[in-house]
């Protein structure tokens, strides 16, 4: 009974230390948030619990000889780690590399291979959690994410950014269309001046990119804060630009095909 009480006391103390650890990191994160803090908090919690379990088990004297007999051999230990903990070790090491190299941070919007896009909201010992649209969340193992090609829309920036493409008709006044689009974006309550210049932060300009089959392509980047939902920003900006182009008589084209054929009898060109 004394040994059982001792084991319960040790496990309770370990659990209490994890709560203290959580409270300390919670206070730190209220001032400064980041991947490293979240990963380190969970890593310390795991170490505390493992250490508590080891101390509790070691209180049973007979268990020590069994432990040495089971795991004393290098071959057996390697086999256990190789088969039972291979994925876990890879994910933990992958998470460690992510926190050290920091290809993204909490709040960054990233796009992964395969088209998965979301906002980084959490990292655990084994996974990174991305928030997609509405209530969708993507839980991706650290080891896989560590080897993926990642597109970060706000790398090493406090602000996030989104790419916007707009199409106008061939006969449109391009310079006027650029001014109309820039004004509509700046009037959005969700967009902010995020482009750094010598004169200060400004909104990104709208560029005339290329001639397409049925339209002229204009593109720009819109910056916004991490508190703003990506879907909310895109909806608001697209609606404002659509309405602004309509009011200014700027054509928003759609793909069409102009077909020409010949009348084989009269040899006349007929346009459909």
Image (cartoon, rainbow, N blue to C red):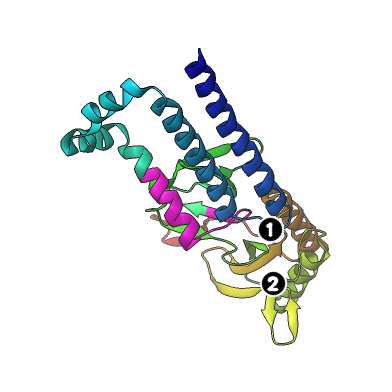
Q: Is residue 92 above or below residue 66?
A: below
Q: Residue at x 41, y 57 (%)?
A: 149
The reply to whether the magenta stretch includes residue 208 is no
Q: How many marks?
A: 2
Q: Which residues are magenta?
A: 90-110
Q: Nearer the viewer, residue 88 or 266?
A: 88
Left-right relation of 250 to 34: right
Nearer the viewer's eye, disc 1 or disc 2?
1
Q: Nearer the viewer, residue 254 or 257?
A: 254
Q: Residue furthest bottom?
A: 198
The reply to whether the magenta stretch includes residue 106 is yes
Q: Which mark is residue 32?
A: 1
Task: Specify whether residue 32 is in view.
Answer: yes
Helix, strand or loop at mark 2: loop
Helix, strand or loop at mark 1: loop
- In the rendering, at what x and y percent does residue 104 appear? 54, 58
User: Residue 31 occupies which quadrant of the picture?
Assistant: bottom right
Residue beneath disc 2: 172
- In the rendering, at what x and y percent does residue 214 appear? 56, 63
Crowdedness of circle 2 by 10 Å Cα count: few (<14), some, many (20+)? Answer: some
Left-right relation of 120 to 7: right
- In the rendering, at what x and y percent does residue 130 appear? 56, 45
Report how far apart the C-alphas of labels 1 and 2 lie in the structure. Answer: 49 Å
Q: Say whether marks 1 and 2 touch (CB < 8 Å).
A: no
Crowdedness of circle 1 by 10 Å Cα count: few (<14), some, many (20+)? Answer: few
Q: Nearer the viewer, residue 26 or 201?
A: 26
Q: Residue at x 72, y 59 (%)?
A: 225
Left-right relation of 86 to 168: left
- In the rendering, at what x and y percent does residue 163 appear? 61, 62
Left-right relation of 237 to 119: right
């Amino acid at each position: 009974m004394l040994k059982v009480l001792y084991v319960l006391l040790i496990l309770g103390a370990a659990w209490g230390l994890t709560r203290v650890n959580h409270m300390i990191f919670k206070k730190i994160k209220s001032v400064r948030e980041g991947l490293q803090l979240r990963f380190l908090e969970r890593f310390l919690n795991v170490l505390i619990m493992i250490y508590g379990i080891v101390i509790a088990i070691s209180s049973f004297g007979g268990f020590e000889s069994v432990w040495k007999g089971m795991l004393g051999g290098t071959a057996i230990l390697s086999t256990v780690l190789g088969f039972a903990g291979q994925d876990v070790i890879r994910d933990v090491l992958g998470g460690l590399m992510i926190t050290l190299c920091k290809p993204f941070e909490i709040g960054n919007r990233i796009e992964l291979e395969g088209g998965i896009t979301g906002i980084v909201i959490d990292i655990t010992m084994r996974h990174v959690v991305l928030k997609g649209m509405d209530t969708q969340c993507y839980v991706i193992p650290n080891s896989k994410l560590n080897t993926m090609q990642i597109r970060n829309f706000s790398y090493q920036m406090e602000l996030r950014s989104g790419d916007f493409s707009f199409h106008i008709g061939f006969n449109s006044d391009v310079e006027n269309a650029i001014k109309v689009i820039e004004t509509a974006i700046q009037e959005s309550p969700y967009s902010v001046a995020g482009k750094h210049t010598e004169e200060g932060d400004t909104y990104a300009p709208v560029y005339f990119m290329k001639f397409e089959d049925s339209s002229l392509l204009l593109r720009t980047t819109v910056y916004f804060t991490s508190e703003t939902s990506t879907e909310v920003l895109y909806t608001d900006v697209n609606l404002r630009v659509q309405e602004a182009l309509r009011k200014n008589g700027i054509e928003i084209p759609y793909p069409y095909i102009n077909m020409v054929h010949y009348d084989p009898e009269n040899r006349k060109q007929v346009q459909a």
